[in-house]
Image (spheres, rainbow, N blue to C red):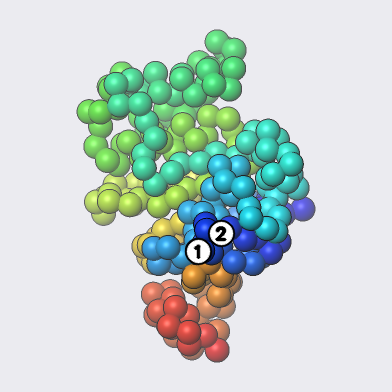
Amino acid sequence: MYAVQTKGLVKKYKTKTAVSGLDLAINEGEIYALLGVNGAGKTTTIRMLTCLSKPTDGECFVCGKNCVSQMSEVKKLTGISPQDTAVAENLTVTENLQFICGIYEFSAEKTAESVERLIKLFSLEEYKNSRAKTLSGGWKRKLSIAMAMIGEPRVLFLDEPTLGLDVLARRELWNIIEKLKSKITIILTTHYMEEAEKLSDRIGIMINGELKAEGTLSELEAQTGEQGLENAFVKIAEGGKE
């Protein structure tokens, strides 16, 4: 059973087709980077896989559960950290985490355990009593991802997790994501080629709503005859995949 699977997935908005016949099969425990220029369909795909948007056609599954007919089961299996950092600015780090625990209806004991575990995992001890609005962009992203992991998801979606962060903050987040490797399945969208090279087991490249290429870095290099992900991506985007 795949952690994530789509079959002929389509999403249309009036006359625009955002995702067109997408077939994905992502294994449990891998980090899969979904790449593409703005408007390629990456975020729309994630929205369908996390039950935030219904497909126009086709099917999508998370851990074997249908994202349309089994929405409640899928939501229990997934966590998402969106592009726009989703934190409550006037709550402290601890209160943000406690708030999400409340949504999951955790007991007081499980709430305390979950908050402590995630504060430690994301090295948030120094800021646990600080209001979110006082945090830097990097710390807010860490908190956002920690909040996405409260429900102990089997599949974690990270939509542009390091967008706008400085080099040091980006690399700190990379270290955290690497710690999660093989423990859960991670689907990552990013515009940073170095990030995809560093973190992912496999890479999918979307162009105009379609999956144009997929594989490990070495496989994509072999397909295109180019060295480095950026060069391979450009060739595929320009229609030069061999």
Q: Residue 146 is drawn in which quadrant?
A: top left
Identity of the amino acid at label 2?
Lys
Residue 53 showing in the rendered view: yes
Q: CA distance from mark 2 to mark 1?
A: 6 Å
Residue lying at the far top of the rendered structure: 108
Q: Kindly identify which residue carries mark 1.
A: 16
- Residue 227 x %, y %: 42, 82
- The residue depicted at 41 percent of the width and 58 percent of the height is 190
Image position of 199 with respect to 75: above or below: below
Category of crowding for the residue at label 1, using alpha-carbon neighbours closer than 10 angstroms: few (below 14), some (14–19), many (at least 20) = few
- Residue 226 x %, y %: 44, 85
242 vs 219, nearest the viewer: 242
Image position of 22 with respect to 111: above or below: below
Pointer 2 with pointer 1, Cβ within 8 A: yes
- The residue depicted at 39 percent of the width and 75 percent of the height is 230
Identity of the amino acid at label 1?
Lys
Q: Residue 143 is drawn in which quadrant?
A: top left
- Residue 195 x %, y %: 40, 60
Q: Residue 30 is drawn in which quadrant?
A: bottom right
- The residue depicted at 46 percent of the width and 65 percent of the height is 40
Residue 228 showing in the rendered view: no
Q: Kindly identify which residue carries mark 2.
A: 12
